[in-house]
Structures are given as C-alpha cells and as structure tokens.
Amino acid sequence: MISTRLGDALNEQVKWELYSAYLYLSMAAYLEANRLRGFAHWMRKQAEEEKTHAMKIFDHLASRDYRIRLLPIDAPPSDWASPEEVFAETYNHEQRVTGLINNLMRIAEEENDRDAQEMLRWFVKEQVEEEESAESVLEKTRAAGGDLQTLDRELGNR
C-alpha cells in the first residue's frame, strides 16, 4: 500500500506530466502556424512522451490501489516571440519537472517506499535525457540564427 502523502504527490505529478503534454502541443501549434513543421513534429513527439510519462505514474498508482483523481490543468501559453523562445521555455520547463521528480524521490525515500523509488529512478534518468535534448535543440536554434530551414528538416526526422 502506498502512503497518502506519496500517493497524493504522485497524483499531482500526473497532472504536471499532462500539463507538459498540453504545453508541448501548444508549442507545436505555434510552430505549425509559423510553417516550421519539423519543429512542430519534434514538439508533437515530445507531447506523446509526456502522455506516456503520465500513464506510467497513473499505472503505478493504480497497481498500488491508490484512488487516482485527475486534477485541473491550466491552459498553457499559446504565443512566443520566436522558436528560440519556445525552446528556452522547453528547457526551463524540463528543469522544473526535474525538480518535481527529485522532490517525489525525496518523499519516497522518507516514506521508505522502495517500489516507488524504483519507478522514480526511471524518471530521474529520463529527466537527464529530457533536459539534454531540450538544451541541444535550444543551442542549435540559437546557432542557426534566422536560418532555421536546415534545423527544421533535421527535427522533422525525430
């Protein structure tokens, strides 16, 4: 059985993972509107990953007989000044999620919940990859300056 404290915190994380998917889908819409379909494709893939992350936690909670309650999700922003700003926000958002995951791990350790710790180790590793990926695209976007077509084609191959 999972503690109420940890279950509630994980339930909250389901919301944040779904918000991440919603945010990245909003970013994809912005990029589509700016005819950067490769960038938009990258964001759509990112949104799909975030939904998978939410379901991983959802399934963990369900398997532990925790009553899941879906929480309200705020509307994400819908406009940015540039693709560079999109990826700067993506990188910052992933850093925030890393902090949330680290806090969940701390709670799981305090609650002495080995099963949750095992599940969360996957997320800790995943967040390293998420931050690296977002930072890489941000750096490439900055390096490309105004000429984003080559990078747009590259990101379309994700």
Image: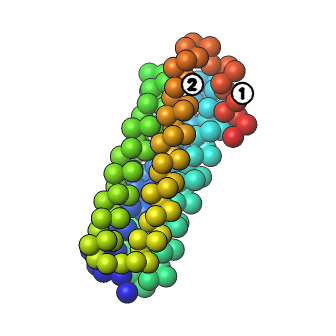
Question: In this rendering, does residue 26 appear at all?
Answer: no
Query: 15 above or below 150?
Result: below
- For disc 2, the marked residue is 140
Q: Nearer the viewer, residue 37 or 136?
A: 136
Q: Position of residue 121 (x, y in %)?
A: 46, 64
Mark 2 vs mark 1, foreground winner is 2
Q: What kind of element bears circle 2?
A: helix
Q: Are marks 2 and 1 in contact (CB under 8 Å)?
A: no
Amino acid, disc 1? Arg
Toward which corner of the image does residue 93 lie, by quadrant? top left
Measured from the top left, where is residue 113 in percent x and y? 36, 78
Query: Dot 1 corresponds to which residue?
Result: 153
Q: CA distance from mark 2 to mark 1?
A: 13 Å
| Residue closest to the eye, 75 or 8 | 8
Please report whichever mark, 2 or 1, sits nearer to the chain's N-terminal start.
2
Judging from the image, what secondary structure is the residue with disc 1 in?
helix
The picture quadrant where one finds residue 105 is: bottom left
- Quadrant (top left, top right, bottom left, bottom right) of the C terminus: top right
Amino acid, disc 2: Lys
